[in-house]
Image: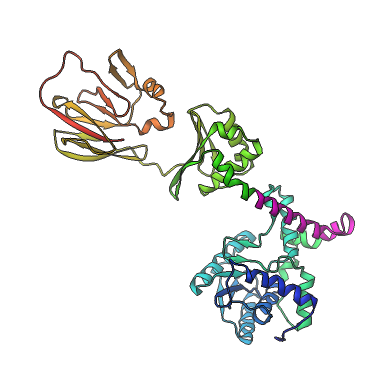
């Protein structure tokens, strides 16, 4: 196999495509390190040859070969790749799957996980893969046939998740093969690429050739053009989303892997066209680490305009959309923890924590109060022990005008229904509600009680 440099229009076009990726401000410079995904097939061998021997200065290279253990010949492919890398002076990392993946999707996940492990262990900036224009056309058609959304029409991105770079995406397979034969490259053919048991092979060997022969001679190029146009549309949307999100007053926290909450102005959202609302809601759900499908998106848009206050809907993936008066709230709830009540047995001093609907609330008693963010109330010591707990059905509190249900009190105080379980309620030894911090304090009955009091402070 030849390692000599070559010139000419084809080589220059390929070299330019590669150089554009390497010279990009986000790509590594000549002093950095990059991983090359090397299957041993035509495409990846051309890519490695261009990186190793092309005229464009690039990073130092490590080849990475993943043996899926799905074919009898795969072990021989790995040995061949090792020999190629030795001949070209390129370090090579090889790994074999412990068990053959059960599907193309599982194989792809395992391969990319391996490439990321190699990238991390080598301290590399990028992983180069050899996807080309034919791959793009097949991917777009495959997604169309499965009913993709507009975003899916963008096909394979030239960059993925920061570290994946695909410099040959604008080049066609016949161009790569012509280049390989001209410079004397050899490669390994994967027989499974011709088996029609795989959906992508049916598209490659039957549907696209028939479409070009009988429907549209330029079908492949048209599909690549469609991907390019869709990608430009997506880029335009990305540029607009930031200002659109600002217009709907996004607040809250997208949280950690355990949960999160994002709040938007319902009125501001409803001013926008339904398709724009859908984009915004999908973008916000993505911040919670989830993806809205078509059904979830439709449900979210409908609820945003017609959902009642206090109500909510599940959007799938553990994400909920709720309405709190004039606000819409996207939630990815945390794992449920049981409520933990707190008993204040004596005049103290003491401290403790009550947990209501997953929210920890600090409680102190027997002190002087005055702490920032803490509401206090003096309670007659003869009412001890008192309990701090969540609201319970039927709870009432005595106010100057008579008793009132806490449910009605919360409604008057404009406390959203899904937040009421977080409100602490203080009840005395007889089970009478004496205080709802931030909402109401009970009046005494049967004359004012005398004697010592205890100051209770509850975090607000």
**Closer to us: 456 or 213:** 456
Question: Taking 413 as reference, is 200 left or right?
Answer: right
Asked whether the viewer can see residue 372, the reply is yes
Label tally: 0
Instruction: Locate residue 72, reporting x and y percent.
Output: 65, 74
Vertical arrangement, residue 186 with respect to residue 205, above or below: below
Q: Residue at x 26, y 20 (%)?
A: 442
Q: Is residue 380 above or below residue 30?
A: above
Classified by dominant secondary structure, the portion drawn in magenta counts as helix
Give the x, y percent position of residue 152: 68, 51
**Does the segment drawn in magenta span residue 215?**
yes
Relative image position of residue 71 (x, y in whole percent): 65, 71
The relative height of residue 133 versus residue 142 in the rendered view (above or below) is: below
Per the image, is 436 magenta? no
- Seen from this angle, which residue lies furthest left? 451
Q: Is residue 85 left or right of residue 116?
A: right
In percent of width and height, residue 429 lies at 19, 25
Quarter holding the C terminus is top left
Q: Colour scheme of this structure image?
A: rainbow
Q: Quadrant of the N terminus?
A: bottom right
Relative vertical location of residue 115 with respect to residue 247 in this rendering, above or below: below
State which region is magenta.
208-236
Q: Residue furthest right?
A: 214
In the depicted view, which residue is nearer to us: 321 or 415? 415
- Residue 184 appears left or right of 52: right
Residue at horizontal 14 percent and vertical 36 percent from the top: 348
Q: Is residue 289 left or right of residue 193?
A: left
128 or 82: nearer the eye?
128
What residue do we see at 21% from left, 34% from top? 343
**Residue 42 visible from this viewpoint:** no
């Amino acid at each position: 196999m030849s390692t000599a440099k070559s010139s000419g229009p084809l080589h220059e076009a390929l070299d330019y495509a590669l150089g554009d990726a390497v010279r990009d401000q986000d790509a590594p410079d000549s002093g950095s390190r990059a991983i090359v995904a090397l299957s041993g097939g035509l495409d990846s061998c051309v890519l490695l040859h261009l990186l190793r021997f092309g005229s464009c200065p690039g990073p130092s290279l490590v080849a990475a070969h993943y043996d899926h253990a799905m074919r009898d010949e795969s072990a021989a492919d790995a040995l061949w790749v090792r020999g190629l890398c030795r001949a070209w002076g390129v370090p090579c990392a090889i790994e074999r799957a412990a068990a053959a993946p059960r599907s193309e999707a599982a194989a792809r996940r395992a391969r990319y996980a391996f490439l990321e492990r190699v990238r991390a262990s080598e301290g590399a900036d990028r992983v180069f893969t050899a996807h080309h224009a034919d791959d793009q056309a097949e991917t777009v058609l495959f997604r169309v046939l499965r009913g993709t959304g507009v975003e899916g029409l963008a096909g394979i991105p030239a960059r993925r998740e920061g570290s994946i770079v695909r410099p040959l995406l604008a080049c066609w397979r016949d161009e790569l093969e012509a280049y390989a034969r001209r410079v004397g490259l050899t490669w390994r053919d994967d027989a499974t690429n011709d088996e029609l048991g795989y959906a992508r092979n049916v598209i490659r060997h039957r549907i696209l050739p028939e479409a070009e022969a009988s429907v549209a001679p330029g079908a492949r190029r048209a599909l690549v053009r469609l991907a390019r146009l869709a990608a430009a549309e997506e880029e335009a949307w990305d540029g607009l989303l930031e200002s659109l999100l600002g217009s709907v007053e996004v607040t809250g926290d997208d949280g950690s892997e355990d949960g999160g909450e994002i709040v938007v102005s319902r009125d501001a959202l409803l001013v926008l066209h339904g398709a724009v609302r859908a984009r915004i809601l999908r973008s916000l759900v993505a911040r919670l680490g989830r993806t809205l499908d078509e059904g979830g998106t439709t449900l979210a848009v409908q609820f945003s305009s017609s959902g009642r206050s206090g109500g909510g809907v599940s959007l799938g993936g553990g994400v909920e959309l709720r309405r709190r008066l004039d606000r819409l709230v996207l939630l990815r709830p945390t794992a449920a923890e049981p409520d933990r009540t707190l008993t204040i047995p004596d005049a103290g001093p003491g401290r403790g924590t009550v947990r209501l609907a997953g929210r920890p609330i600090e409680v102190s008693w027997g002190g002087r109060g005055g702490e920032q963010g803490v509401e206090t109330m003096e309670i007659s010591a003869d009412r001890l022990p008192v309990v701090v707990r969540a609201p319970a059905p039927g709870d009432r509190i005595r106010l100057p005008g008579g008793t009132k249900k806490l449910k009605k009190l919360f409604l008057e105080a404009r406390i959203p229904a899904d937040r009421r379980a977080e409100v602490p309620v203080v009840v005395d030894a007889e089970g009478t509600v004496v205080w709802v911090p931030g909402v109401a304090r009970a009046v005494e009955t049967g004359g004012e009680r005398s004697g010592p009091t205890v100051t209770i402070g509850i975090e607000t």
